[in-house]
């Protein structure tokens, strides 16, 4: 291959996260709403009929479909489907930092404003219930953070003899931080808590 061919290939390449084509891509909306003259954050409790993470607390959201205009469109569509709203009921939708999960997902979070709590009619096949928490609670109560340790376990036929150190190779330890907020009888944790904490960091 000639040098001009190499530079031509590089010039026409748009950088992205290496391996991102193998990641599942999701969008979520962190909904804000006015309640009792105060801004609240709205949460869903996932239906117990769901196969994945039944009963857990989350934000409206889901996998990005090929028909979605973009990540923002996917977040709005999922919120409309799960909360029984119209697009016009969701305004001021803005992105915050996206998140790369160690479980093979890229999550695109957005913050949006829901006009009226009374307009919400949850989809019972996906949502068991909704609840709100005053934003002031999160501004004054930092999350508790705990670490999950991962240990490297190469598969049985891994070529350890090709590594410097062989069987004694020192794998780099890996830790995952899990965030927890506890409000009354509700436990908000995992990716939902991580996104929420990032949002609060931006505000502060």
Image (cartoon, helix red, strand yellow):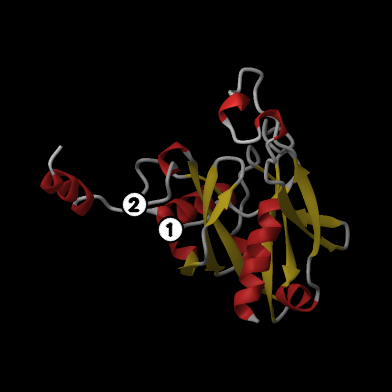
Residue furthest top in the image: 157
Residue found 67% across the figure and 34% down from its top = 52
Q: Element at badge 1?
A: helix
Label 1 environment density (alpha carbons within 10 Å; few <14, some 14–19, many ≥20): many
Whether residue 155 is situated above or below residue 32 in the rendered picture: above
Pointer 2: what residue? 69
Most foreground residue, 57 or 119:
57
Q: Position of residue 85 (x, y in %)?
A: 52, 56
Most foreground residue, 189 or 134:
189
| Quadrant where the C terminus is found in the figure | bottom right
- Using the numbered discs, state the Cα–Cα distance from disc 2 to disc 1 in whole angstroms: 8 Å
Label 2 environment density (alpha carbons within 10 Å; few <14, some 14–19, many ≥20): few
Q: Is residue 43 visible?
A: no
Q: Quadrant of residue 203?
A: bottom right
Residue found 34% across the figure and 51% down from its top = 69
Q: Do the CB atoms of the residues marked 2 and 1 lie less than 8 Å apart?
A: yes
Residue found 73% across the figure and 50% down from its top = 175
Pointer 1: what residue? 72
| Res. 87 mark | none
Q: Is residue 24 visible?
A: yes
Q: Position of residue 32 (x, y in %)?
A: 61, 69
Q: Is residue 119 left or right of residue 77?
A: right
């Amino acid at each position: 291959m000639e040098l001009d061919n190499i530079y031509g290939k590089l010039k026409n390449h748009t950088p992205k996260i290496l391996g991102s084509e193998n990641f599942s891509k999701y969008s979520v909306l962190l909904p804000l709403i006015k309640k009792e003259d105060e801004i609240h954050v709205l949460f869903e409790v996932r239906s117990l009929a769901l196969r994945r993470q039944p009963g857990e607390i989350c934000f409206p959201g889901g996998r990005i479909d090929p028909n979605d205009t973009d990540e923002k469109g996917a977040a709005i569509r999922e919120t409309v489907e799960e909360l029984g709203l119209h697009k016009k009921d969701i305004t001021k939708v803005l992105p915050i930092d996206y998140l790369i999960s160690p479980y093979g997902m890229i999550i695109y979070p957005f913050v949006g404003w829901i006009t009226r709590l009374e307009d919400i009619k949850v989809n019972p096949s996906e949502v068991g219930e909704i609840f709100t928490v005053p934003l002031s609670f999160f501004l004054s109560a930092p999350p508790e953070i705990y670490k999950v340790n991962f240990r490297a376990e190469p598969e049985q036929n891994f070529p350890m003899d090709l590594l410097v150190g062989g069987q004694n190779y020192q794998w780099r330890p890996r830790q995952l931080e899990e965030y927890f907020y506890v409000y009354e009888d509700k436990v908000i944790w995992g990716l939902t808590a991580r996104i929420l904490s990032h949002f609060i960091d931006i505000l502060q």
